[in-house]
Image: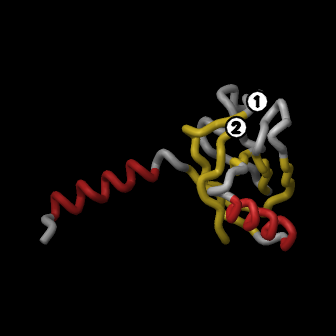
């Protein structure tokens, strides 16, 4: 049986772990596919959502899904959402960045999760 202090500690750890990721909601309004030979940002599917991303340390306009074998389901979902015009919930990972920009000098953030809003 877990005591009150233990439950509070576990809840605090979970909240701390989730705070490294931040989410944004909106309809995908632009979707760009880059291949391995793209010198600027290779092997990503970059997207823009209506209303932009308001996540500290991340570019306000762009985020991307890394194009690798473990994320193909996310790319398929993003394409379907874009085609249907449905809003999505995007969870960004500020500790995994790519292409530097004026809005986020350390780079644009990658997407860790994308789902229905």
Dot label at residue 83: none
Classify residue 75 by image quadrant: bottom right
Q: Secondary structure at mark 2?
A: strand
State the residue in front, 96 or 42. Answer: 42
At label 2, counting other C-alpha atoms closer than 10 Å, the crowd grade (few under 14, some 14-19, many 20 or more) is many
The image shows a total of numbered marks equal to 2
Q: Can you identify the residue that label 2 sits on?
A: 108
Quadrant of the image for the C terminus?
bottom right
Asked whether the residues under the numbered discs 2 and 1 touch, taking CB atoms below 8 Å apart as contact, a structural biologist would say yes
**Could you tell me residue 46's position as x and y percent?**
78, 48
| Residue name at image x 58 percent, y 40 percent | 94
- The residue under the point 83% across, 30% down is 39
Please provide percent x and percent y for residue 90.
65, 58
Circle 1 Cα neighbour tier, 10 Å, few/some/many (<14 / 14–19 / ≥20): some
**Percent x, y of residue 9:** 24, 54
Give above or below for 30 relative to 97. below
Residue in the picture at 15% in, 67% down:
2
Query: Whole-percent x and y of residue 82?
Result: 83, 65
Colouring: secondary structure
Vertical arrangement, residue 80 with respect to residue 113, above or below: below
Label 1: which secondary element: loop
In the image, taking residue 73 as reference, residue 85 lies left or right, namely right
Q: Residue at x 81, y 64 (%)?
A: 79
- In the foreground, 111 or 61: 111
Q: Tag on residue 101?
A: 1
């Amino acid at each position: 049986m877990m005591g009150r202090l233990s439950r509070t500690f576990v809840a605090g750890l979970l909240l701390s772990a989730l705070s490294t990721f931040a989410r944004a909601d909106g309809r995908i309004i632009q979707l760009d596919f880059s291949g391995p030979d793209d010198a600027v940002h290779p092997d990503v599917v970059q997207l823009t959502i209506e209303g932009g991303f308001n996540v500290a340390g991340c570019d306000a306009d762009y985020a991307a899904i890394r194009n690798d074998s473990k994320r193909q389901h996310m790319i398929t979902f993003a394409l379907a959402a874009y085609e249907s015009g449905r809003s999505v919930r995007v969870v960004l990972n500020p500790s995994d960045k790519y292409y530097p920009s004026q809005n986020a000098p350390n780079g644009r953030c990658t997407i860790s999760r994308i789902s229905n809003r």
